[in-house]
Each structure stands twice: as structure tokens, then as C-alpha cells.
Amino acid sequence: MAHPIIVEDECIGCGICVDACPQEVLEVTGGVATVVNEDSCIACGECVEECPMGAIPEIAED
């Protein structure tokens, strides 16, 4: 399964990655992006590309 790796110390909770994700894998919870629907991730990389802080450096493939 694929899912984004989020570096919580770098995330500012802006929600740009949430809006960019076509599969609704992410949401902002407690001020940081959180993976809430890992099974739906298609590893498209939109969240990685759109994050202005670089807080999502990669998509992990399990």
C-alpha cells in the first residue's frame, strides 16, 4: 500500500496537500497533515509536489 510520509515538525497545517489529493487521503488534524485514508492512496505525488514546506518528502510503498 502507498501513503504519504509527513514530517510533522515541518508541516504548518496549511491544508494545501489536503486540497491537492484526489483521493481524500489527508486531512489537517491538530494543526498538521495526517493520513486518514491510507487505503485510497494512489501514489500520484500531488501532495508531495504541492506542499510549500517540503513536509511530505516521499510516498512510501509498503
Image: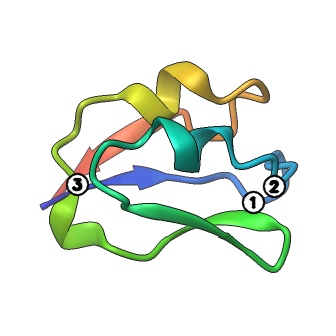
The image shows residue 45, relative to residue 1, as above or below, that is: above
Q: Which residue is mark 2?
A: 13
**Of the image marks 2 and 3, the number of the one nearer the N terminus:** 2
Name which residue type carries label 1: Glu
Callout count: 3
Query: How far apart are the alpha carbons under marks 1 and 3?
Result: 19 Å
**Of the image marks 1 and 2, the number of the one nearer the N terminus:** 1
Name which residue type carries label 3: Cys
How far from the left and from the top, in percent, is residue 19? 54, 43
Query: How far apart are the alpha carbons under marks 2 and 3?
Result: 19 Å
Image mark for residue 43: none
Q: Residues within 10 Å of mark 1 (few under 14, many from 20)?
A: some
- As helix, strand or loop, the secondary structure at mark 3 comes to loop
Query: Which one is in front in this view, the residue at disc 1 or the one at disc 3?
Result: 3
The image shows residue 10, relative to residue 54, as above or below, that is: below
- As helix, strand or loop, the secondary structure at mark 1 comes to loop
Q: Which residue is mark 3?
A: 41
Q: Nearer the viewer, residue 19 or 59?
A: 19
Looking at the image, residue 54 sits to the left or right of residue 20; the answer is right
Residue drawn at the location 30% of the way across and 48% of the way down: 60
Q: Residues within 10 Å of mark 2 (few under 14, many from 20)?
A: some
- As helix, strand or loop, the secondary structure at mark 2 comes to loop
Q: Which residue is mark 1?
A: 8
Looking at the image, residue 38 sits to the left or right of residue 21; the answer is left
Name which residue type carries label 2: Gly
**Of the image marks 1 and 3, the number of the one nearer the N terminus:** 1
Q: Residues within 10 Å of mark 3 (few under 14, many from 20)?
A: many
Residue drawn at the location 65% of the way across and 30% of the way down: 51
How far from the left and from the top, in percent, is residue 1? 12, 61
Res 34 quadrant in image? bottom right
